[in-house]
Amino acid sequence: MFVGEQPGDQEDRQGEPFVGPAGAMLDKALEDAGIPRADVYLTNAVKHFKWEPRGKRRIHKKPRASEIKACRPWLQAELRAVKPEVLVCLGATAAQAVLGPQFKLMQNRGTLLDAADAKGLAGPAHAVVATIHPSAVLRAPDSEGRRAAYESLVADLKVVAKALRRRT
């Protein structure tokens, strides 16, 4: 089970998570990490698209802690229903929603954590892994930055793939 921050513009318009450019990036990274996309459940910590207008575009705006807390019951219900083997947090907001506001993504990304670290939120998950959000790859300032970000995302997802192989 993968948890992102919140729907983006295209996700909000289509009613499905990860269908925009970040979703395409995630699909490619999953493939390169050896995780079948059909085996992945995708959701977000915040269930609404928070945005601000910029011309004719709707630009993502970071959700407040109160919005994350308000959406927590829905995420908990999804975790109980899905019963994931591994819970993957995509980005700092998702990681902090699951692992607590003190969690430092860049210090701990790609590490297989015990689900007990999730303060009860991970439910039946056996392990939690946090990594960068696929949109971080897209936002990198140049091609070298995008390559490095993508490689780190795939490396973190390979940790997930290895954990799943051990559990099956």
Image (cartoon, rainbow, N blue to C red):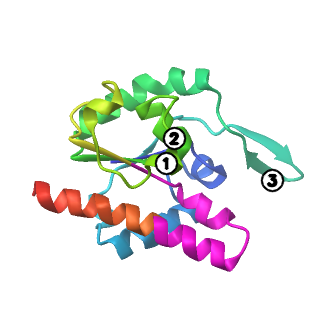
Residue at x-position 52% and y-position 50%: 106
Under circle 1, the secondary element is: helix
Q: Amino acid at mark 3?
A: Arg
Front-lying residue, 121 or 142: 142
Farthest right residue? 55
Left or right relative to 160: residue 101: right
At 39% across and 67% down in the image, what residue appears?
155
**Residue 164 found in image quarter:** bottom left
Q: Position of residue 76 (x, y in %)?
A: 35, 28
State the residue position of label 2: 104
Q: Earlier in the sequence, mark 2 or mark 3?
A: 3
Magenta region, residue range: 130-152
Left-right relation of 167 to 117: left
Residue drawn at the location 48% of the way across and 72% of the way down: 151
Q: Amino acid under label 2?
A: Lys
Identity, as a three-letter code, of the amino acid under mark 1: Gln
Query: Is any part of residue 5 visible from this angle?
Result: no
Seen in the picture, residue 21 relative to 42 is either above or below; the reply is: below
Q: Is residue 117 above or below residue 17?
A: above
Say few, some or many: other residues with alpha carbon within 10 Å of mark 2 (under 14 / 14 to 19 / 20 or more): some
Between disc 3 and disc 1, whose residue precedes? 3
Residue 47 to residue 131: above or below: above
Q: Are marks 2 and 1 in contact (CB under 8 Å)?
A: yes
- Gap in angstroms between the C-alphas marked 2 and 3: 31 Å
Mark 3 sits on what residue?
57
Residue at 9% in and 58% down: 168
Q: Which residue is mark 1?
A: 107
Whether residue 161 is situated above or below residue 10 in the rendered picture: below
